Image: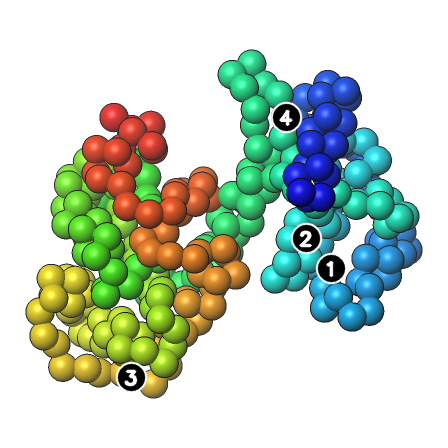
Amino acid sequence: MVFRGLQALLLAALLLVGAPWTLAQETLDEAQQATLRTRLEVDGMGLQVGSITPSEIPGLFAVQFINGPLVYATAGGDYFVLGDLFAVGPKGYINLAEKRRDGERVQRLAEVAPEDMIVFPAQGEARTHITVFTDVTCFYCQKLHREVPELNRRGVEVRYLAYPRAGTDSDGFRQLATAWCAQDRQGVLTKLKNRQSVPQNVCAGNPVAAQYQLGQDMGVRGTPAIVTADGQMIPGYQSAAELMATLDLE
């Protein structure tokens, strides 16, 4: 209830300001950032400030805690608001906090080496790509995989990352590692998603645990979790037709 009240106050503040969704031109020097970090990193709370950037509202700064929430704080760190920041646009509300998260997802995924993904390329010229956190034991992951040929045909490259829902000490982890360790990664992944038996092969140095951690860091809580080229997170299954509409590529 308290958090909802804070969110309402933040939205009300934005409505009063009436500013377009551009970043305020305020910045904090190193000393001011250090002060803000000290104020917010309260002993016993277990939170560490990761980044401090200008927000869209003058006087408030977007503070991202490491493995924690995004908050909007005053320069001195005396007050902060927990909740998403919205702008009011011609077509309704725009979640500016989510747009920030979109950008962060793009950056994090850009750090993943292409050879650590299992990629199903688009046929002909690629129109866009999606990155899918997947688990071979997940029914809707299996269902989505059957849509991949149609997505490829319609110009969408599908990039898979591993996300064993039951954790790194699970049969799902070992099956995903088997796919990532295979010579024919596409073929083995497809067999596993078709519930075909494949001898387990968990090779040293496979990226499954790292990708699972990346998914957790990015807020993945279930599979499939689809991330678009511009960082939008789509939780859950969508058919090829639905995805094309979501991607505005009908």
Quadrant location of the N terminus in the rendered image: top right
In space, the residues marked 2 and 4 are separated at their CA atoms by: 19 Å
Circle 3: residue type: Cys
Left of 167 or right of it: where is 237?
left
Q: Earlier in the sequence, mark 3 or mark 4?
A: 4
Residue 64: give its label.
2
Residue 125 in view, yes or no: no
In space, the residues marked 2 and 1 are separated at their CA atoms by: 6 Å
Tell me residue 70's x, y (percent).
66, 49
Answer whether labels 3 and 1 touch (C-beta < 8 Å). no
Choose between 16 and 114: the one closer to the eye: 16
Circle 1: residue type: Val
Q: Secondary structure at mark 3?
A: loop
In space, the residues marked 4 and 1 are separated at their CA atoms by: 25 Å
Crowding at mark 3 (Cα within 10 Å: few <14, some 14-19, many 20+): few
Answer whether labels 2 and 4 touch (C-beta < 8 Å). no
Q: Secondary structure at mark 2?
A: strand
Counting labels gives 4
Question: Can you identify the residue that label 4 sits on?
Answer: 87
Find the residue positioned furthest to the left: 196
Residue 243: give its label.
none
Question: Can you identify the residue that label 3 sits on?
Answer: 203
Question: Can you identify the residue that label 1 sits on?
Answer: 49
In this figure, which colouring scheme has been used for the structure?
rainbow
